Image (cartoon, rainbow, N blue to C red):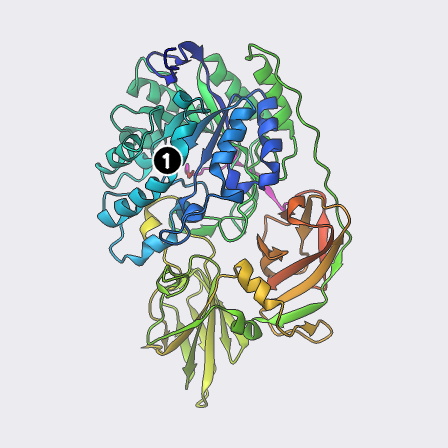
Amino acid sequence: MSARQGLRADSTHFTLDGAPFRILGGSIHYFRVPRAYWRDRLLKLKACGLNTLTTYVPWNLHEPERGVYLFQEELDLEAYIRLAGELGLWVILRPGPYICAEWDLGGLPSWLLQDKKMKLRTSYSGFTSAVNSYFDKLIPRITPLQYKNGGPIIAVQVENEYGSYAKDERYMSFIKEALLSRGISELLLTSDNNDGLKCGGVDGVLQTVNLQKLTFGDVQHLAELQPQKPLMVMEYWSGWFDVWGEPHHVFPAPEMISIVRELLDRGISINFYMFHGGTSFGFMNGAVDLGTYKPQTSSYDYDAPLTESGDYTTKYHLLRSLLSTYSNEPISEPPAVQSRRAYEPLAVTHYISLWESLQCAETLFRADDPVNMECLPANHNNGQSYGYTLYQTDIYSGGDLNSRNHVRDRALVFIDRELIGVLDYRTQKVKISQSKSERTLSLLVENCGRVNYGPALDNQQKGLVGDITLDNVPLKKFTMHCLDMKTSFINRLQSQKWTSVGTKPTYPAFFRGSLVVDQPTDTFLKLPNWSKGVVFVNGQNLGRHWSVGPQKALYLPGPWLRSGDNEIVVFEELKAAETVHFAENLEYGKTVDVSTQLFCTLI
């Protein structure tokens, strides 16, 4: 029996096993969807008339510490790919190592930043040796799932939008060879926005383009670069991501459908980014910085055809109707909608202040100068990746406290545990009252999310990244507490003495309440009249809450709940209310149409 012939790009149309083939794809990230819902979301993708699943692979989740690899449970990539195959879907895999994806540091592990000379996404040996070690573990899991071996993977992407970074002309050849030498043998692709096409390619690899509208001649540009090759839009942006403090982005369904129809009529292959966005659970959101730092929300709804919680939208139904006219066979019926419920409001019963919680932190560190998160000797010397770091030192006078723009990204400033101000990129000075007595200065610094796109990637160290001064004199002798708020920390907190909420709390603080559930069901958790912080359910980090919006509720998947008591812990920086509320649907403040905004292509 002759070997199966995989996806080929030898003429103006793709072929698969020798027959003409059009890729109709959709992006769903396994790491943004609870595993219990993988099947549901993939069935909904197939029932829309799509034939291919695309997903990124986040290095920072799979190798959280050097040499520690996680590929189980929610991170079981092989199970996800096999499931797609069982459901009759092909797979295009995008293993990076850089993925962008509105994900912290574009998926790169923060421990890379411990190297002062690090040059990410280049042929710098400190980076390539780390990539080689990671690929040695990742790629052998993928190769058996390739088309030639009877698996669903028909193509693999080489890096991601490198044309928009383009700092090293040898780098893309290194990544291509890293894939080929480990047994990747299916079609290789690159993907770039229009501006990146001219320097994002690599010899022998098919280029694809990322876009939302057809007004800029992107497809024509691609066709001229690659005559007699199939055209593909690898990322057709179905919506857009959100940043804190700005409106929720929407892209009108009728406008999207008319553009997609034109692409299909021209015989172009397409992948919807995102088809279902899901959630950047925990502290994993990225940030934008093209001159101004803007952290992204935990919700990655993206105004995609499926909502953050997996619901159908007008966009989904219109797209399904359109795609059915391009399908040679009838498409399957969409699965039933999952139920959700708004649980009764939950009264917060106890709290414990941040100051009292410090004994649950793994350990404390002392140094003359402040040490950035990544260089703290925490997590087996891999540094601190996410969350907050508390910096403390004694002062003996007052005056101007100047961050010298060394706060990454936001710091609450306390004198003897009394809040006196906030330092961030905009506010770099706080006045401290005069006093000759010894006082403790504390800065609670939050990593709000590392930039995931653009030239600032190498400079994403968090915490205090340099001296801070009091009346122009650098402060010294710091004590530092790593508060990455892992599940183990939240669990240790439970054994501490919590105070009844009848007493006025000292902020910041953790607040606790119990949600009693008979049948675990999806819901959205809301915190009206709270200010800013993080939410944990049964020890798991749901994500950040912040009253500035646009995100007004956090998606709480039913599989994260259990029948009976469920422990809700809210870390609140500034101001708590007495209750936690629930809703059936995601809520936003103001919305803005992405097509009316002048924005850079950031994915």
Question: Does the magenta run of residues contain 240?
Answer: no
At label 1, counting other C-alpha atoms closer than 10 Å, the crowd grade (few under 14, some 14-19, many 20 or more) is: few
Please state the horizontal and vertical placement of residue 372, each as a whole percent of the image.
37, 64
Residue 124 horizontal/vertical position (percent): 23, 46
The residue sitting at the front extreme is 1
Q: Can residue 107 be seen in this view?
A: yes
Kindly identify the residue that appears in the image at 59 percent across and 17 percent down: 322
Against 461, residue 312 (above or below) is above
Q: Would residue 597 be counted in the magenta stretch? A: yes
The amino acid pointed to by label 1 is: Pro
Residue in the foreground of this view, choosing between 519 and 165: 519
Magenta segment, which residues?
A: 588-601
Q: Which residue is drawn at 58% across and 69% down?
A: 508
Residue at the disc numbered 1: 140
**In the depicted structure, whether residue 476 falls above or below residue 362:** below
* Quadrant of the image occupied by residue 86: top right
